Image: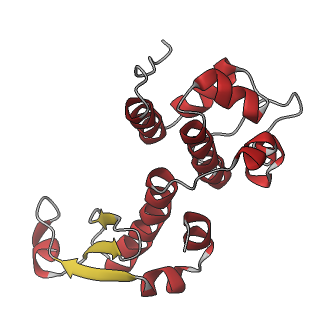
Amino acid sequence: MSRRLWTALSDDQLLRQCEVDVYRASGPGGQKRNKTSSAVRLRHGPSGVIVIAEESRSQHANKAKALRRLRQALQLRCREPLAAAELAAIGDRPEIAAVRNAAGRLDVGSRDPRYWDAAALILDVLDATAARVRDSAAALRVTSANLLHFLQQDPKVWEQANALRRRHGQNPLRAER
């Protein structure tokens, strides 16, 4: 299976692919927190991604947060290779079209659920272009500045972009001030 298939699964289907651990979290929260096993750790078997959620005193709330984090982690860490023909038409993909404004710029906040699908595809494009920002921006039909602004919206996406650059022998990107 691939990242796109994993992230399209329902919560129940995705949970069936995971090993779920519940445990007692340490830290503030008083007597109730120390008596209940409310923290949740999910290990996604097919990808090897591990996420935890232990903020809430409710196991159900923590499981929901862990599932959200798992979906984001899959988007961030699992790359799907792009063929040259796919790269030429990448700007027309629905994940990118959904985050374009009327002027054609990538314009969506990192809290918007559409951001994560677009970010995953953009990281795939970066990987396919040996992490060259100019080539990636050209494939996406946006400016390099717009692409960099989009990547900087979430620190984890920025970190993954720089990890791709390191892997391809490129210098890390510097954040705009």
**Relative to residue 142, is residue 119 depicted above or below?**
below
Q: Residue at x 84, y 31 (%)?
A: 104
Q: Quadrant of residue 171?
A: top left
Q: Residue at x 78, y 47 (%)?
A: 85
Where is residue 62? Give x, y as percent: 35, 71
The outermost residue toward the front is 84
The outermost residue toward the top is 177
**Relative to residue 149, is residue 106 depicted above or below?**
below
* Residue 96 seen by the camera: no
Where is residue 129? Give x, y as percent: 60, 34
Q: Quadrant of residue 102?
A: top right
**Relative to residue 176, is residue 129 depicted above or below?**
below
Q: Quadrant of residue 113?
A: bottom right
Where is residue 3? Give x, y as percent: 55, 64
The quadrant the N terminus occupies is bottom right
**Relative to residue 132, is residue 140 depicted above or below?**
below
Relative depth, front residue between 101 and 27? 101
- Number of numbered discs overlaid on the protein picture: 0
Relative depth, front residue between 169 and 175? 169
Q: Is 143 left or right of 165, judged from the image as shown?
A: right
Q: Is 130 left or right of 107, judged from the image as shown?
A: left
* Residue 147 seen by the camera: yes
Where is residue 24? Give x, y as percent: 14, 75
Q: Residue at x 45, y 21 (%)?
A: 173
